[in-house]
Image: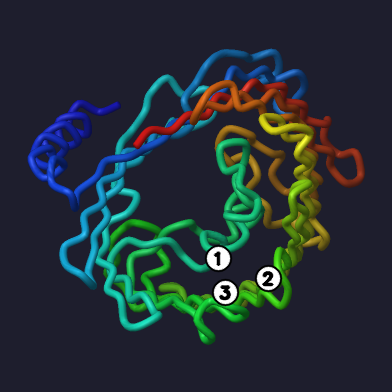
């Protein structure tokens, strides 16, 4: 990690410590990483690599500033790329949140409606892998802007989230291109959720990008199951269309053990021309390919707030143009508060 990043984090945490002793301020965080092994890979330079890494470290400060206004500041530390020996620090969240009746108005660097409010919560295994639209870079988990979320019926059936932002993740921006997001979730019966999502982005180079997603899930005492379909269209000199189908199931085998299976499948041929797979961190795909990803594993709650997840990630490519990828990992996830 760059020295200046460490200094910034240490100085800021030191400045926050006096307020932590109050009833309003609190610190929390979590970390996850792996012992990874690349059993097979489309890139021969990666085959047989193995080792330990932290993929993410989060450190969060929350404070209730008044009865109706609160704030959050979260730092994230992440590896720069596959096999990187460095961590770098940046601001993940930085926002004010104001209660407006049953609604919440958020301003700053905030979670986008894309997957941070329903899909990621139901999947519940971010430490194992990102949700599909995040993993395949359809959208970012954060954006700098203003958002409103809440319920149309006091949280019983219909919930919504809308946002207007830069479209540049947690970075600043100085151009005319902006992004509009919207999601509506329905909970008609206990345990069952259906969400529809869409976004529109006018990019600085005059491109226009549309993304839409449908998600359905069910949660019960036995576990949870979900299915998702998404499509992204970029309109410019040559319009392309990326379709993605994903499904997962998490079964509670016992009080402390869950069995996990998931598949993400590309469904349109434009992946073979437009997919920048080599740029996906921690699990690089073949670029210009039509991939299908399989994830299988089991999660063990080894102690309070500590989980160990042995898992395998297997990627196959349409047309057998590339070798299959196989990653065997032991993931460690723990949190504090």
For the point 78% across and 46% down, the residue is: 222
Callout 1 touching callout 2 (CB < 8 Å): yes
Which of 289 and 165 lies nearest the eye of the viewer?
Answer: 165
Quadrant for residue 11, please give it: top left
Callout 1: SS? loop
Residue named by callout 3? 209
Residue 82 x, y percent position in the rendering: 54, 28
Position of residue 28 relative to residue 303, above or below, is below
Mark identifier at residue 132: none
Real-space CA distance between mark 1 and mark 3, rounded to the nearest whole angstrom: 14 Å
For the point 48% across and 56% down, the residue is: 141
Callout 1 touching callout 3 (CB < 8 Å): no
Callout 2: SS? strand
Compared across the picture, whether 330 is left or right of 79 comes to right
Q: Nearer the viewer, mark 3 or mark 2?
A: 2
Residue named by callout 1? 114
Real-space CA distance between mark 3 and mark 2, rounded to the nearest whole angstrom: 14 Å
Which of 288 and 164 lies nearest the eye of the viewer?
Answer: 164
For the point 20% across and 70% down, the residue is: 67
Q: Quadrant of the N terminus?
A: top left
Residue named by callout 2? 213
Which residue occupies the extreme bottom position in the image? Answer: 152
Judge the density around disc 2: few (<14), some (14-19), many (≥20) Cα neighbours within 10 Å.
many
């Amino acid at each position: 990690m760059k020295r200046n990043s460490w200094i910034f984090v240490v100085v800021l945490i030191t400045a926050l410590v006096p307020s932590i002793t109050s009833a309003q301020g609190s610190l929390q965080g979590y970390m996850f990483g792996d012992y990874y092994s690349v059993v097979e890979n489309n890139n021969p330079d990666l085959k047989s690599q193995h080792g330990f890494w932290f993929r993410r470290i989060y450190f969060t400060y929350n404070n209730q500033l008044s009865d109706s206004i609160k704030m959050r500041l979260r730092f994230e530390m992440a590896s720069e790329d596959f096999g990187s020996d460095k961590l770098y620090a940046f601001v993940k969240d930085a926002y004010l949140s104001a209660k407006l009746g049953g609604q919440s108005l958020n301003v700053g660097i905030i979670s986008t409606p894309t997957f941070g409010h329903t899909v990621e919560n139901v999947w519940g295994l971010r430490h194992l892998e990102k949700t599909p639209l995040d993993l395949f870079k359809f959208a970012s988990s954060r954006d700098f802007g203003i958002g409103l979320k809440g319920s149309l019926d006091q949280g019983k059936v219909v919930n919504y989230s809308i946002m207007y932002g830069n479209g540049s993740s947690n970075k600043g921006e100085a151009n005319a291109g902006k992004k509009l997001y919207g999601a509506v979730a329905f909970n008609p019966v206990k345990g069952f959720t259906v969400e529809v999502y869409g976004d529109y982005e006018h990019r600085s180079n005059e491109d226009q990008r549309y993304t839409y997603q449908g998600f359905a899930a069910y949660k019960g005492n036995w576990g949870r199951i979900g299915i998702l379909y998404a499509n992204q269209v970029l309109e410019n000199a040559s319009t392309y269309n990326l379709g993605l189908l994903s499904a997962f199931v998490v079964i509670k085998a016992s009080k402390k053990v869950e069995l996990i299976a998931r598949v993400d499948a590309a469904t349109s041929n434009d992946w073979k021309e437009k997919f920048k797979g080599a740029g996906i961190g921690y699990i690089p795909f073949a670029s210009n390919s039509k991939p299908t990803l399989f994830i299988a594993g089991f999660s063990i709650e080894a102690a309070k707030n500590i989980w160990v997840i042995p898992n395998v990630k297997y990627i196959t490519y349409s047309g057998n143009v590339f070798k299959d990828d196989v990653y065997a990992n032991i993931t460690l996830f723990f949190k504090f508060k």
